[in-house]
Amino acid sequence: MLFSSKDLPSQHSINSPNEGGFSLHTIGKGSRKFAQDEDLSDVFTELSEHEIIMYFTKGRWSMHHLIKHICEIVGPCEVTLCTWAMTEKPLATIERLRQENKITKLTGIFEDKILTKGKGYAFAKQFFDETYTTRCHAKVTVFENDQYAVSVFASSNLTKNRRVENGVIISDRETAIWAKNYLISITNQDDNK
């Protein structure tokens, strides 16, 4: 057996990135929703605190669609996103959200390979407030304003996703802060724009 329940921490905690080890966080008694395929927009037209939405999509939703949808729900917000790959069309959607002030600050954490693949990184550098690179396969987006803190942990990159993708949307400030802080901590800080 790899581990037993006795190996779990005795209290729920969120470890800082440098502590390492196992981290367990209980969201609480928030609502759970499930979505698949085209009904994702029907499942959530608003978000409440401690809500979790798990979804699958067969190419009908891409990450830029989801970012736009969440920005419309939460209102103007800071966005921190991490992706392994990106292309220009999804980036154009993000740029529009930035120009319309639906995104008030935009931070990007990108896989190192993006520096040499396509034109996406050069395009992103034009309108992102901060950009970082690192060796990372994670796909995470965090939305923050005074009223909301939402995290999306997904299989999809910032590209047009034509395959089955899945993800979890969590409306919880502690989770959002933890995810954002971890992602910033692993970046090559000297890449900051």
Image (cartoon, grey):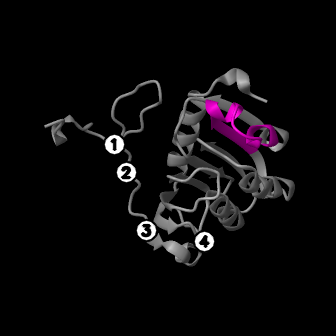
Mark seen at residue 46: 4
Residue beneath disc 1: 12
Q: Earlier in the sequence, mark 4 or mark 1?
A: 1
What is the distance, in whole Å, between disc 2 and disc 3 at their CAs? 13 Å
Does the magenta segment cover residue 116?
A: yes
- From the viewer's perspective, tell me whether residue 44 is left or right of residue 32: right
Q: Amino acid at mark 4?
A: Glu
Instruction: Please report the bounds of the magenta region as a residue range.
Output: 106-123
Q: Are marks 4 and 1 in contact (CB under 8 Å)?
A: no
Q: Amino acid at mark 1?
A: His
Look at the numbered disc 2 and give the secondary structure of its residue. Answer: loop
Q: Earlier in the sequence, mark 1 or mark 2?
A: 1
Q: Earlier in the sequence, mark 3 or mark 1?
A: 1
**Of the pair 158 and 108, the residue shown nearer to us:** 158
Residue beneath disc 3: 31
Q: Dot 3, how many residues are within 10 Å of its Cα: few (below 14), some (14-19), or many (20+)? A: some
What is the distance, in whole Å, between disc 4 and disc 3 at their CAs? 12 Å
Q: Is residue 2 above or below residue 190?
A: below
Q: Position of residue 81 (x, y in %)?
A: 64, 45
Give the image quarter of residue 70.
Answer: bottom right
**Of the pair 61 and 4, the residue shown nearer to us:** 61
**Of the pair 57 and 4, the residue shown nearer to us:** 57
What is the distance, in whole Å, between disc 4 and disc 1 at their CAs? 28 Å
| Quadrant in which the C terminus appears | top right
Give the image quarter of residue 54.
Answer: bottom left
Residue beneath disc 2: 26
- From the viewer's perspective, tell me whether residue 125 is left or right of residue 39: right
Look at the numbered disc 4 and give the secondary structure of its residue. Answer: loop
